[in-house]
Every structure is written in structure tokens, then in C-alpha cells.
Image: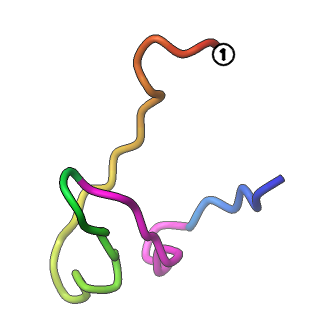
Amino acid sequence: MADRHIPAVGEAAPPISAAITGDGTFELSSQLGTWVVVYFYPRANTPG
């Protein structure tokens, strides 16, 4: 099971890498120095 550590206010976010629409990957580290909102939601129409 993945670590479920929730960063405290002011603590650096963990490294995040995710597939994006098209052929690409979003790397949170590429946004260093800018404000970013990372929002996760369950995939539509999946059980659980």
C-alpha cells in the first residue's frame, strides 16, 4: 500500500508525475516557484 502521508501546511509536496491528455506527462517539479492546484478525483463509472 502506498504511503498516505498528508503534507502539513508549508511542507513541500511529494514528487508527482501523471499522464496528461495526449502524449505527455505532468511533473509537479516543473512548476517549482508557481502556485499549483492538484485535484484528484475517482475515475467516472468505476466501482468502489
- Can residue 9 be found in the magenta stretch? yes
Left or right of 37, for residue 9: right
User: In the displayed structure, would residue 14 be above or below residue 20?
Assistant: below
Give the main secondary structure, helix, strand or loop, of the magenta stretch: loop
Q: Position of residue 36 (x, y in %)?
A: 22, 65
Q: Please tell me how crowded label 1 is: few (under 14), some (14-19), or many (20+) other residues with Cα within 10 Å.
A: few
Q: Residue at x 34, y 85 (%)?
A: 29
Q: Secondary structure at mark 1?
A: loop
Tell me the colour scheme of the image: rainbow
Comparing 7 with 15, the one in front is: 15
The foreground one among 7 and 19 is 19
Query: Height in image: 16 above or below 38?
Result: below
Quadrant including the C terminus: top right
Q: Residue 35 appears in which quarter of the rendering?
A: bottom left
Q: Residue at x 44, y 27 (%)?
A: 43
Q: Give the residue pinned by disc 1.
A: 48
Q: Nearer the viewer, residue 29 or 7?
A: 29
Q: Which residues are magenta?
A: 8-20
Does the stretch in magenta take in 19? yes
Q: How many marks?
A: 1
Residue at 35% x, 58% y: name it: 19
Q: In which image quadrant can residue 28 be found?
A: bottom left
Quadrant hosting residue 40: top left
Residue lying at the far right in this picture: please name it: 1
Residue 32, position as x, y percentages in the image? 25, 87
Q: Nearer the viewer, residue 22 or 13?
A: 22
Identify residue type, mark 1. Answer: Gly
Return the x and y of residue 45 as percentages of the image width and height.
Answer: 45, 11
